[in-house]
Image (cartoon, rainbow, N blue to C red):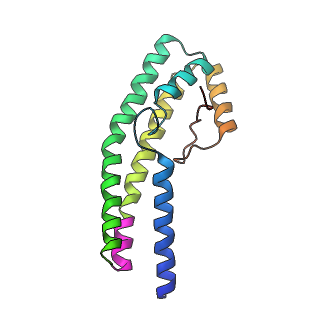
Amino acid sequence: MKSLPQTLFSLGAAIVLSSGLAMAQGPGPGPRGGGMGGPRMLNFLSTYLDLTSTQQTQAQTIFTTEQTNSKTVHQQLATQRQAVEAAIQAGQTAAQLTQLTAAEGPLLAQLEANHAIAQSQFYALLTPDQQQKFVALQKLHGPHPGGSSAPQPPPGN
């Protein structure tokens, strides 16, 4: 069994980690966050990968679906985080706080799954040359703040 200081440290680490993930994810679906599908990202990928108009339309559908599927999850995550904050302010026990914060895990996993599905569908519609450029772009930019490997557009694009 963990000592009280170890339990409090674990709880604090979980809260800091979940807060960091929340901030890294940005404001949620739309042009500024919530996946690959913001207009700025689609414009960047369209130019960089030289997408055809058909590919652009398909990509927009894929990204819109991701945003739609993630919207409810984002709302649930926000509600869960409000519950954690309320529990902290109410002086809940470490066990109660651990239980509340653990409920965020499946929601974060669902967001990642939605993103991975969209990325896979997008990758599948690319030509082999475009796929190569996309993979190179992913390697260049590394993982995005949410944890997956979708590239982020350079500033100003």
Residue 2 visible in the picture: no
Can you give x and y, in whole percent of width and height, for residue 79 in the image? 30, 55
Q: Is residue 81 left or right of residue 119?
A: left
48 is higher (above) or lower (below) than 12: above
Q: Nearer the viewer, residue 74 or 26?
A: 26
Residue 128, quarter of the rendered image: top right
Residue ID at (54%, 48%):
147
Q: Quadrant of the C terminus?
A: top right
Q: Is residue 76 left or right of residue 22?
A: left
Asked if the magenta segment contains residue 96, the reply would be yes
Can you give x and y, in whole percent of width and height, for residue 122 in the image? 50, 27
111 is higher (above) or lower (below) than 37: below
Can you give x and y, in whole percent of width and height, for residue 117 in the image? 45, 37
Type of secondary structure dominating the magenta stretch: helix
Q: Nearer the viewer, residue 4 or 57?
A: 4
Residue ID at (47%, 25%):
39
94 is higher (above) or lower (below) than 50: below
Residue ID at (30%, 63%):
83
Which residue sits furthest top?
53
Asked if the magenta segment contains residue 59, the reply would be no
Residue 3 visible in the picture: yes
Residue ID at (44%, 40%):
34
Residue 45, quarter of the rendered image: top right
Write the start and end of the magenta stretch as one range.
93-101
Can you give x and y, in whole percent of width and height, for residue 43 in the image? 53, 21
Q: How many marks?
A: 0
